[in-house]
Image (cartoon, grey):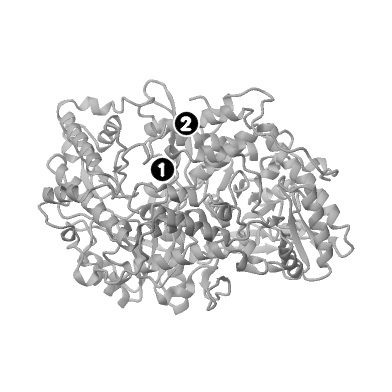
């Protein structure tokens, strides 16, 4: 499709601005001006609308197609959240207002939203307190690792490494390394989890923390997790929970009772806020009592008189991880979501998410290799190893699914499963949709047997077929 | 409310396919002692109740103040069509475009966004966006360390104090040395920068306009820094680039900034948008997603996520950054804004801001107790000095319906009498006159 920069005509305008109503002109010396105006498009409002509407039509979203992208929890995003986040009483609120006197009194509604969301998340996870500041899941991880570092520093502990299983998201080792830790990877055992025995081989006094996803990225709950947590605490290390998979255990189990000391939660996964094509998300971090004092500045508190305030005097805090109070617009949507479902509704979320995933696992396991054949949680991981004998790879199956009108599952992750296909249906999909997806997957397995070339050339239903990514990385055409 | 589609009958059918009697059996894998006992959350609310509750909360915020509050976050006009586009759920309910064949909409939009950022800043390449201006500045600092292999960073005190606090937070466990340089008459102290520049210096971090609103040309500092083998990073207010000299024209190595002013509401601090541009030679050291042009086997043009070997999902602990998502929807929002205003309109916004700020400064300094703090030229924000505490004056003006500015004493010792006043195209001559009158009355 033509770029917006190649549309329009010289001198054409979109939005008109009011005339200057003051007599003065700015007194800025000539040398401080740019040489020529930025070469932005010259298009009418209608051209802008048509251009972007056409672009939007070249895109799958949860609102257009089933989107079983494992590990991403692509559930339906309730529209009331979109409405609420657009109320002028929230959008027009300047983040520096609380720093003027009379401070927080100018923003009581917004502070209440943040405070109550923190409370809800604490109840859901068993943590003592949350910060809503982290702006994404990976940002939450980094915040968590910095809290871990502050804890050890305060205790005078000399800790150098973080243990992470080989099935973890890439963000886990990246976050630990960026905060200055060495990463030690532990292989998963034959049951698809980090086994107690393998783990004990790497645990020593140098360990600052263990980062685990619970349930793990294979969608499996580690039955030895409590035993591992106890050993971690014996060397005064901390248990960090990557909450990416919290959608599996709402109301069923709390990370704090499992033995985790801190965690992040992905509001854009578990709490129904849209993924935005890759952000904005939000990754609030919750901690147990002993870590509270290290939480970032500022923290919303509730005063005795029922009003809310921001606490800036936090001498042990790690400091400022975000400019203000987090992605407030996203927090608003999550708050609305939690209130909309209530406690019982949230339990049903996990029940239905887990049921849907197990149903898919059961129906497809005779057609695709299932490396870990046991009850899964909210997602299941297959391997295309059987189809590989015909020269068909996970990517080919993924691309063929597009022709059937489905967004592909996550492929080639987790790294420990050869030709992995990770399917997460979420709770909001109906049995009819899931059955149609299963049927398509079975047909594709047959096609792989009979006509593998059909899969190699997929997708055939889209305006473009597979793009040459290697050439793109070499040519580096990144702008016009 | 519930957003679950399946009926009890369907659930029973699915359970029987699994050979189970109840959903509880699926959770047997969780040991009994690890199961939840308490679960004290409110009862579900209907959509109507939710709407009433949230509308009430929205009313408990003071959004009717006439605002001259800035500090890096500005109340600009947002054209109606911006929301029309970002409300398209094909965009906002998608995820990171891992499957290019069904994500060309998002991918092309990001490519266009990258192009717009390059044109705005005169930098050679841009990434697909970062979380916000502060994290973008931190990422730029780390990028300079990767490029130079050096560990000393010089930071001008004119850089947003909030961003400086963030820089300290993120690097507190790393062996990096930060040297903060006090400003001289409101702008960068050249002598001190020159003195600090040495063979260990990785980067000099600057901001334009700086936190006091003063504008500058960093070309001379870039020259000195490059002689010492260091990079120069500049955080920049994008609306000012409608008229002001660009980071590219100054020879800046990494330009970053907060994109909120490009069509995003203030929204109590987020979601916002961090942008970053740099030279082509540094692109492989740049953090975040990048979209590039590609072709299929029939020669048809499309867009893909490219240079992914820098990223965490491939490189894990060796990645350039831990960033996974960027802020795609916000980047789209900025792109639509820039496109709607276009070449002329964007320049006009900048001119309106600058002219109205000049008028406001003139009017406020007509008051005998109000002086301009610095003699430097400014864009849309400036510092005035009162004869008493600025916080007191601002508090008194809240009573009169104004968010009149920001009390600089909060972050700068010795500036307790100084107030930072921001003016956008939204402020009218009448409002400016009223501010002047009211300020005069409270002093």
The 10 Å Cα crowd at callout 2, few under 14, some 14 to 19, many 20 or more, is: many
Of the pair B125 and B326, the residue shown nearer to us: B326
User: Which chain is mark 2 on?
Assistant: A
Of the pair B60 and A269, the residue shown nearer to us: B60
- What residue is shown with label 1? B93
Q: Is residue B318 left or right of residue B263?
A: left
Is residue A214 something that shows in the picture?
no
Q: Residue at x 57, y 56 (%)?
A: B269
Mark 1–mark 2 Cα distance, whole angstroms, equals 14 Å
The 10 Å Cα crowd at callout 1, few under 14, some 14 to 19, many 20 or more, is: many
- Image coordinates for residue A237, horizontal then vertical, percent: 35, 73
- Image coordinates for residue B435, horizontal then vertical, percent: 79, 57
Q: Is residue A10 left or right of residue A357?
A: right
Q: Residue at x 44, y 45 (%)?
A: A278
* Same chain check for tags 1 and 2: no
Q: Quadrant of the N terminus of chain B?
A: bottom left
- Image coordinates for residue B150, horizontal then vertical, percent: 57, 56
Check the image and report above or below for A365 versus B399.
Answer: above
- Image coordinates for residue B261, horizontal then vertical, percent: 63, 47
| Mark carried by residue A55 | 2
Identify the element where label 1 is drawn: loop
Q: Quadrant of the C terminus of chain B?
A: bottom right
């Amino acid at each position: 499709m033509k770029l917006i920069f190649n549309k329009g005509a010289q001198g054409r305008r979109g939005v008109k601005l009011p005339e200057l109503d003051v007599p003065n002109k700015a007194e800025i010396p000539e040398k401080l001006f740019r040489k020529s105006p930025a070469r932005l498009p010259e298009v009418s409002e209608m051209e802008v609308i048509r251009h972007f509407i056409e672009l939007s039509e070249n895109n799958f979203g949860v609102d257009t197609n089933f989107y079983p992208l494992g590990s991403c929890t692509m559930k339906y995003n309730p529209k009331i959240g979109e409405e609420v986040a657009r109320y002028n009483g929230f959008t027009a609120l300047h983040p520096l207002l609380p720093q003027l006197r009379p401070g927080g009194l100018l923003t009581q509604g917004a502070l209440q939203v943040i405070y109550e969301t923190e409370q809800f998340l604490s109840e859901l996870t068993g943590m003592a307190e949350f910060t809503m500041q982290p702006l994404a899941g990976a940002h939450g991880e980094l915040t968590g690792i910095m809290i871990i570092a502050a804890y050890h520093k305060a205790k005078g502990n000399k800790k150098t490494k973080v243990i992470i299983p080989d099935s973890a998201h890439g963000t886990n080792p990246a976050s630990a390394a960026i905060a200055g830790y060495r990463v030690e990877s532990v292989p998963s055992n034959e049951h698809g989890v980090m086994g107690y025995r393998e783990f004990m081989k790497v645990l020593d006094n140098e360990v600052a923390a263990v980062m685990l996803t619970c349930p793990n990225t294979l969608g499996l709950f580690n039955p030895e997790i409590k035993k591992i947590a106890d050993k971690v605490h014996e060397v005064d290390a901390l248990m960090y929970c990557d909450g990416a998979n919290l959608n599996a255990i709402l109301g069923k189990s709390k990370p704090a009772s499992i033995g985790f000391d801190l965690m992040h939660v992905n509001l854009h996964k578990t709490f129904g806020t849209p993924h935005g094509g890759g952000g904005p998300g939000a990754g609030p971090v919750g901690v147990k009592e002993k870590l509270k004092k290290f939480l970032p500045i500022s923290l919303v508190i509730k005063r005795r008189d029922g009003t809310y305030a921001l606490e800036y005097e936090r001498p042990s805090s790690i400091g400022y991880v975000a400019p203000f109070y987090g992605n407030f617009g996203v927090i608003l949507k999550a708050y609305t979501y939690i209130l909309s479902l209530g406690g019982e509704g949230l339990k049903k979320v996990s029940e239905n998410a887990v049921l849907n995933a197990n149903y898919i696992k059961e129906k497809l396991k005779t057609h695709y290799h299932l490396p870990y054949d046991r009850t899964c949680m909210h997602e299941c991981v297959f391997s295309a190893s059987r189809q590989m004998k015909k020269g068909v790879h996970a990517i080919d199956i993924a691309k063929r699914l597009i022709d059937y009108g489905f967004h592909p599952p996550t492929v080639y992750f987790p790294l420990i499963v050869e030709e992995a296909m990770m399917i997460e249906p979420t709770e909001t999909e109906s049995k009819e949709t899931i059955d149609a997806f299963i049927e398509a997957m079975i047909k594709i397995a047959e096609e792989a047997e009979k006509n593998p070339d059909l899969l190699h050339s997929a997708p055939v239903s889209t305006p473009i077929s597979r793009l040459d990514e290697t050439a793109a990385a070499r040519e580096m055409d990144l702008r016009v | 409310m519930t957003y679950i589609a399946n009926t009890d009958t369907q659930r029973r059918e699915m359970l029987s396919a699994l050979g189970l009697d109840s959903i509880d059996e699926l959770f047997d894998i969780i040991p009994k002692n690890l199961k939840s006992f308490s679960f004290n959350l409110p009862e579900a609310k209907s959509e109507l109740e939710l709407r009433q509750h949230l509308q009430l909360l929205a009313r408990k915020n003071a959004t009717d103040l006439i605002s001259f509050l800035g500090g890096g976050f500005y109340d600009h006009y947002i054209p109606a069509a911006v929301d029309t586009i970002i409300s398209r759920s094909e965009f906002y309910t998608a995820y990171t475009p891992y499957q290019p064949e069904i994500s060309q909409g998002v991918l092309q939009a990001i490519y266009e966004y990258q192009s717009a950022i390059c044109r705005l800043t005169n930098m050679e390449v841009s990434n697909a966006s970062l979380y916000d201006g502060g994290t973008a500045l931190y990422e730029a600092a780390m990028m300079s360390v990767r490029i130079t292999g050096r560990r000393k960073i010089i930071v001008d005190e004119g850089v947003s104090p909030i961003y400086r606090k963030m820089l300290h937070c993120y690097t507190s466990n790393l062996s990096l040395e930060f040297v903060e340089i006090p400003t001289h008459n409101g702008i960068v102290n050249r002598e001190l920068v020159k003195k600090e520049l040495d063979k260990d210096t990785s980067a000099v971090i600057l901001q334009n306009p700086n936190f006091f609103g003063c504008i500058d040309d960093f070309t001379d500092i870039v020259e000195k820094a490059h002689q010492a083998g260091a990079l120069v990073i500049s955080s920049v207010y994008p609306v000012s680039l409608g008229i002001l000299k660009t980071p590219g024209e100054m020879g800046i190595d990494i330009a970053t900034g907060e994109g909120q002013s490009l069509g995003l509401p203030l929204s109590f601090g987020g979601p916002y948008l961090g942008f970053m541009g740099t030279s082509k030679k540094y692109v492989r050291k740049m953090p975040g997603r990048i979209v590039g042009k590609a072709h299929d086997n029939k020669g048809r043009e499309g867009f893909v996520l490219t240079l992914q070997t820098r990223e965490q999902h491939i490189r894990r602990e060796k990645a350039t950054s831990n960033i996974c998502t960027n802020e795609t929807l916000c980047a789209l929002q900025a792109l639509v804004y820039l496109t709607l205003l276009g070449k002329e309109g964007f320049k006009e916004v900048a001119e309106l801001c600058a002219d109205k700020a000049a008028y406001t400064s003139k009017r406020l300094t007509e008051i005998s107790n109000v002086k301009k703090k610095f003699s430097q030229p400014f864009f849309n924000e400036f510092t005035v000095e009162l004869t008493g505490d600025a916080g007191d004056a601002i508090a008194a003006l809240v009573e009169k319906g104004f968010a009149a500015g920001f009390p600089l004493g909060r972050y700068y010792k010795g500036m307790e009498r100084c107030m930072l006043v921001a003016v956008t195209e939204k402020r009218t001559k009448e409002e400016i006159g009223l501010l002047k009158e009211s300020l005069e009355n409270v002093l």
